[in-house]
Amino acid sequence: TAGMEASGTGNMKLALNGAITIGTLDGANIEIGERVGPENIVIFGMTAEEVEARRHAGHNPRAIIGADESLRFVLDAIADGTFSPDDRNRYRGLVDNLMTSDGFMVTADFADYCAAQRRVDTMWRSTSGWRAKAIRNVANVAWFSADRTIREYSEEIWGVPVA
């Protein structure tokens, strides 16, 4: 969810290995997008400003779930134990949270996530196109390498010249 995610390095590591990122417009995804270009990253969901506006206006996950048949189907499958036949109530707390408070606004971003996943599916079907995106990502996210970071910190932060 934009505005709420920790900016870790996991997605950078994946991009360095050729992964096509699918994620919200937040944290490191913004930086990755700036490096690889919008055609080589798939962004979905609300912006941080839209998340804040929705929160301020009053987020109503039940209304979103009620209006989205696909989301209802997914939540029903999770709630009825389809994914946890050995413990049918394993994910009950998750579903209850999504239906009542949904602090990360998963329900609000669900339809856009599904559309983004369809875009990724279409990209994947073009083997040469997917390969080209992966190669571009590896080349363009080299900026995140430890070598560049240490050199920059040495010179700009610590004031230590690099040989």
Image (cartoon, helix red, strand yellow):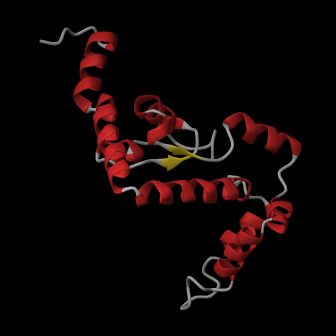
The picture quadrant where one finds residue 107 is: bottom right
Judged left or right of residue 155, residue 101 is: right
Q: Nearer the viewer, residue 78 or 111?
A: 111
Where residue 21 appears, as percent x and y from the top left, is 45, 47
Residue at 41% x, 48% y is: 20
Say if residue 106 shows up in the picture: no
Judged left or right of residue 89, residue 54 is: right
The quarter of the picture where the C terminus appears is: top left
Q: How many numbered discs sit on the rendered protein?
A: 0
The picture quadrant where one finds residue 36 is: top left
Residue at 68% x, 85% y is: 80
Where residue 89 appears, as percent x and y from the top left, is 65, 84
Where residue 127 appears, as percent x and y from the top left, is 34, 56
Q: Nearer the viewer, residue 61 or 101?
A: 61
Residue at 73% x, 65% y is: 97
Task: Spot the residue most to the left.
Answer: 163
Q: Is residue 72 above or below residue 4?
A: below
Residue at 71% x, 76% y is: 73
The picture quadrant where one finds residue 98 is: bottom right
Q: Nearer the viewer, residue 120 or 6?
A: 120
Q: Is residue 101 above or below residue 135?
A: below
Task: Spot the residue most to the bottom.
Answer: 86
Q: Nearer the viewer, residue 16 or 101?
A: 16
Say if residue 38 shows up in the picture: yes
Judged left or right of residue 82, residue 148 is: left
Q: Is residue 39 above or below residue 131?
A: above
Where residue 2 appears, as percent x and y from the top left, is 63, 42
